[in-house]
Image (cartoon, coloured by chain):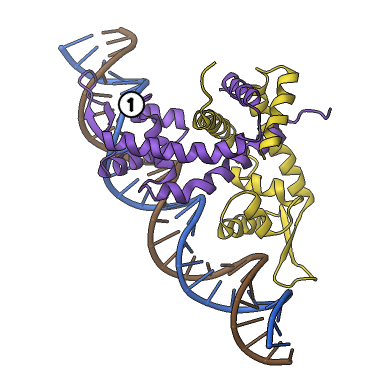
Chain colours: A yellow, B purple, C blue, D brown
Amino acid sequence: MSKIDPAKIWSLNYNLLMSVISGVSPDIAELGLDTKELFVLAQVEEHPYPAELAATLSMPKPTVTVYVKRLEAAGFLRREIDAADLRRHRLQVTPSGRKVTARGLALLSDAFGARLGRLSAAEQAELRSLLEKLS
Amino acid sequence: MSKIDPAKIWSLNYNLLMSVISGVSPDIAELGLDTKELFVLAQVEEHPYPAELAATLSMPKPTVTVYVKRLEAAGFLRREIDAADLRRHRLQVTPSGRKVTARGLALLSDAFGARLGRLSAAEQAELRSLLEKLS
DNA sequence: GGAAATTGGTACAAAATTAAATCACTTCAA
DNA sequence: TTGAAGTGATTTAATTTTGTACCAATTTCC
């Protein structure tokens, strides 16, 4: 067994993810959604504040501001000042936003699922478990 | 056992990688190297032509052009016309490029290794094997 | 051989992303 | 209270990244 090189594992993983993204991006775009916008939208329910989104997605706050603005303009999101803390903007996914998120994630699932299909169900579960430990 | 949702696995993985990247980026920058530049440089030996780099890294050709130009200006790379096909530019990592690549990948290994450390050696090997099947 | 189609790479302009500065609100210590 | 420090979010300006169009070399196919 060869020595385990983290950078090698990392690179495998990175190239895999990028390749999957660039494969689905055109399809996601047809939903009227940019790929990164989908990632943001998909996390809003769990993290309803821009600062939280920025932290969990590892993106700068101004970037989140831009995406949120676009998602709001597209009607996928609503924004309201948080009554408890007037600095915060609480985000709400609209019904149409929920619909487009589901479609986008389905596309992602299909694309990534095509790769995952190379693994047995047990291996898929194992992968998930390993990634959860790393997260 | 819960149903396996590819988008969920994907998202776990994506957030993990992004979080690791944003952690090491500042350190890599101290080497005089942008993170993406490191990724390019690290693949040059294996893929010595810009078009190949663009394909394996899933990035547009003009982006590769820009990085290659910067890496050349920094002395980490040399470029020569391929004798066999005058359209192609064969890339060569210089000694100083090799050195900086090693340092950069070491930083990445440390950062990602810190996460991987949560897994046993057997689990790490398993993860690598799973990712190789997916690649 | 030689036009037509393909491939490798780049220039330029436009779009996306981000760092830095800023504003508004909140918290905390005195 | 109050004012100093901290937090949430945005604006502005600069940088990074990319789409489009393009040129040069090669390959294909008649």
Left or right: A90, with A115 as reference point: right
Specify the quadrant of the image occupied by residue D30: top left
Q: Is residue A42 visible?
A: yes
Q: Is residue B110 left or right of residue B103?
A: right
From the viewer's side, name the closer residue of A112 and B132: B132
Disc 1 marks which residue?
B48
Q: Quadrant of the N terminus of chain B?
A: top right
| In the image, residue D27 above or below residue D22 | above
- In the rendered image, residue A56, in percent from the top left (x then y), is placed at 65, 50
The answer to whether residue B60 is visible is no
Residue A115 or B31: which is nearer the viewer?
B31
Please indicate whether residue C1 sits to the left or right of residue B95 in the image: left
The quadrant of the rendering that contains the C terminus of chain B is top right
Q: Image point 80% across, 71% down: which residue?
A: A83
- Identify the chain of the residue marked 1, using the numbered disc in the image: B
Residue at the spot x=53%, y=44% of the render? B21
Outermost residue on the right side: it is: B1
- Going 51% across and 22% down the picture, which residue do you hit? A3
Neighbourhood count class around disc 1 (C-alpha, 10 Å): few under 14, some 14–19, many 20 upward: some
Occupied quadrant, residue B128: top right
Residue A45 higher or lower than B110, as above or below: below
Amino acid under disc 1:
Pro
User: Which quadrant of the structure image shows residue A36?
Assistant: top right
The percent position of residue A58, horizontal first and vertical second, equals 59, 50
In this view of the protein, which residue sits in the foreground, B17 or B4? B17
What residue do we see at 56% from left, 43% from top?
B20
* Residue B116 position in % (x across, y down): 61, 34
Pick the residue in front: B107 or C17: B107
The percent coordinates of residue A49 (x first, y second) are 71, 59
Reply above or below: A68 against B96: below
